[in-house]
Image (cartoon, rainbow, N blue to C red):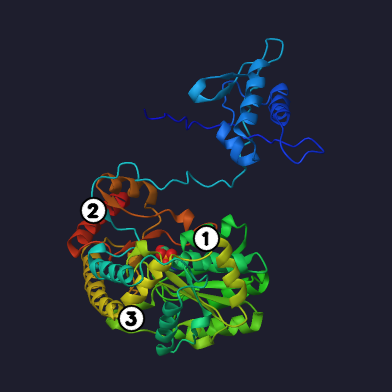
Amino acid sequence: MKRTENKSPYLRLHIARSNDSRAFARMDIVAAVRREYDSGKLPTGSRLPPVRVLQHQLGVAKNTAHAAYEELVAQGVVENRQRLGYFVLARGKDRPTAKTTTPAMPMLLKVGSGVVRKAKGEGKNPIRLGSAFIDAELLPRERVAECFRAVLKQQGLPNDYDAQGFPPLRELIAKRLVKRGIPARADDVIITTGSQQALDVVTRALQKRSIATENPAYGIGKQLFEMNQMDVTGLPLDPFVGPDMKVWRKLLALNRPAVLYVTTNFHNPTGYSYSTAELMQLIQLSQELQIGLVEDDWGSDMLSYSEFRPPLRALGGENVLYMNSFTKKLIPSLRLGFLLANETTRAALLAAKRVATLANPTIVEAAVYEVVARGYYDTHLRRLQVELDTRYRACLDALTALMPEGVRWTTPGGGPVLWLELPRRVDLHAMTERLRENNVLLDARLKEWFFGTPHLHGTRINYAQESIERTRRGLELLAQEIRRELA
Ligand SMILES: Cc1ncc(COP(=O)(O)O)c(C=O)c1O
């Protein structure tokens, strides 16, 4: 007959030896249970550790454990339910039974609901006009899958990891960067879980809890700084005219943040890219005010005609902390990005990464290495850029044809988003809600992007996520809603 084993949870007890003894005696076990029972700490109906557990833990004979439990049965403390084990009995009426008290609630920061859910009213297959993503149809899923299969076949599931990142991938990344005039050594590349983690790592490693960034800012970056209770200086950015360097200088000189974090190509949410002259001015400011530079270069691989412009790190050298990512452009779920340090900054950044994750999954690093080493990534980027360019131009044509007087938009020339600026009369919230009912999703939560009162009144428009036809359909409905608001 098959033995039925009771797997229900049992109590955790501290059992001590009597003073001068080397071995546990029956009475040690009895005393331990009694002590807790008498002080009312053992919930009625809870199970004592099984005899075999005591045998194993204390190194006592089965008979000793049994004898102890039978003694407790005799004392009216527990009952023997045979195969199920020994269970704590209710205590006498004169002594109230142990009450389970509710432990205190951990005191956490206050942030929305914290749950990313489908928005209310969101239908099937909505037109996502407000995201920062690229159409999954344009991403090389089959090629990536092939590389995963190859890696597993060659190496099986790797057992170990390198905290800084899979060395061959770091070598390859450094080589590619150097080809673009960006100073990099494999030793200075730290692989991260997307550029989001690169930003988190920088935040953790700063000596001073202060940072400056564009206003509006990349939303989850802004949230990261706020959750870390950083002192943040928002530097006003108008994507139609670019940064006013005089204002920036004044704010930076006044607040002296530890670093300035900027998205140099296709800033999110405005789509703005810095001119080379502006980047040179930032380097000048950094030198003059001794404020370090952190460059988020998520966008440079999304420039038209497969060209690229020198980033801050190329212009300013290796003191610039540089980050980039494979996520949006390759496959978002790979969550793979990197941070580029130098000899001085590497140790703190690496330590900050280790305390966060120890390391990245080697299998993902190795698969991405294959994708890049085989040339799949560059081939993919070239095709992707052609498609993004086509969608971008179609989006501009649709905006010109559809938008009413008073609506303006930027012309970033690459990346996935542009900024659409609307007359102040338009109620962004009401408009977004009505569009949602028509299955078009916009992102116009200005509070998540702006520090203080927003100086812009609009939203980002994505042209990379939907087909040309669907983007146009979304823009038609958007234009209709704007007209309604203006009427
Ligand atoms: C400017 C910018 N930086 C960083 C990130 C983080 O992206 P990931 O962690 O996927 O690389 C995003 C995401 O949208 C972004 O827009």
Quarter of the figure with the N terminus: top left
Q: Nearer the viewer, mark 2 or mark 3?
A: 3
- Neighbour tally class for label 1: few under 14, some 14-19, many 20 plus, Cα within 10 Å: many
- Neighbour tally class for label 3: few under 14, some 14-19, many 20 plus, Cα within 10 Å: some
The part of the image, by quadrant, that contains residue 276 is: bottom left
Where is mark 2, residue-wise?
477
The location of residue 120, given as percent across then percent down, is 34, 41
Where is mark 3, residue-wise?
373
Q: Earlier in the sequence, mark 1 or mark 2?
A: 1
Q: Answer with the quadrant where ligand 1 appears in the image.
A: bottom left
- Distance (Cα) linking label 3 and label 1: 34 Å
Q: Could you tell me if residue 51 is visible in this image?
A: yes
Where is mark 1, residue-wise?
222
Q: Earlier in the sequence, mark 3 or mark 1?
A: 1
Whether pointer 1 and pointer 2 mark residues with C-beta atoms closer than 8 Å, the reply is no
Q: Earlier in the sequence, mark 2 or mark 3?
A: 3
Question: What amino acid type is highlighted by mark number 1?
Answer: Lys
Side of 435 relative to 99 (left or right): left
Q: Is residue 18 above or below residue 187?
A: above
